[in-house]
Image: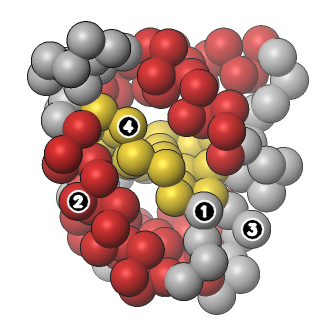
Amino acid sequence: MVSLLIVSHSELLAKGIKELAKEMSGDVVIEAVGGTEDGRLGNDYSKIYEALDKIYTDDGVLILFDLGSSYLTAEMVKEAFEMEGRENVRIADSAMVEGAVISSIEMSLGRSLDEVCEKLLELKINKI
């Protein structure tokens, strides 16, 4: 099953979105990461890497992000995974809350990573 990683500048925001998406999706694996290692607002490469490593499967992982620097850090992590041969990671430029809910529902229905991304495009809440 495809997994979902939520990346935010705020740990509280990431956890809240995860809570909402989990309510809609049952057993979908969702990880939320936000803030820096010392608890400030921001992004932390190591935290994102560890979260992605924890939920990565060959079925793939979709990453949703809140702001541009979250995207940039997630992209660096994605590139590191690709260098390790773990290439089934996509980053979606999506409305974060709506994207998380729609994606997690699609994942719970057994949709592939490509199908989940296509659904986001179809609903016009994503620019992959």
Disc 2 packing (10 Å; few <14; some 14–19; many ≥20): some
The amino acid type, in three-letter code, at marker 1 is Val
Secondary structure under badge 3?
loop
Q: Tell which circle, 3 or 2, labels the residue nearer the N-terminal end.
A: 3
Quadrant for residue 124, please give it. bottom left
Q: Disc 2 versus disc 1: distance between alpha carbons?
A: 15 Å
The amino acid type, in three-letter code, at marker 4 is Val
Q: Disc 1 versus disc 3: distance between alpha carbons?
A: 8 Å
Q: Disc 4 versus disc 1: distance between alpha carbons?
A: 13 Å
In the rendered structure, are the residues bearing label 3 and label 2 in contact, judged by CB atoms less than 8 Å apart?
no
Q: Disc 4 versus disc 2: distance between alpha carbons?
A: 11 Å
Disc 4 packing (10 Å; few <14; some 14–19; many ≥20): many
Instruction: Say which residue appears at 76% left-offset and 33% top-offset.
Output: 87
In the rendered structure, are the residues bearing label 4 and label 3 in contact, judged by CB atoms less than 8 Å apart?
no
**Residue denoted by label 4:** 33
**Residue denoted by label 3:** 1
Secondary structure under badge 1?
loop
The amino acid type, in three-letter code, at marker 3 is Met
In the rendered structure, are the residues bearing label 1 and label 3 in contact, judged by CB atoms less than 8 Å apart?
yes
Secondary structure under badge 2?
helix
**Residue denoted by label 1:** 29
Vertical arrangement, residue 114 with respect to residue 8, above or below: below
Vertical arrangement, residue 23 with respect to residue 52, above or below: below
Disc 1 packing (10 Å; few <14; some 14–19; many ≥20): many
Q: Disc 4 versus disc 3: distance between alpha carbons?
A: 20 Å
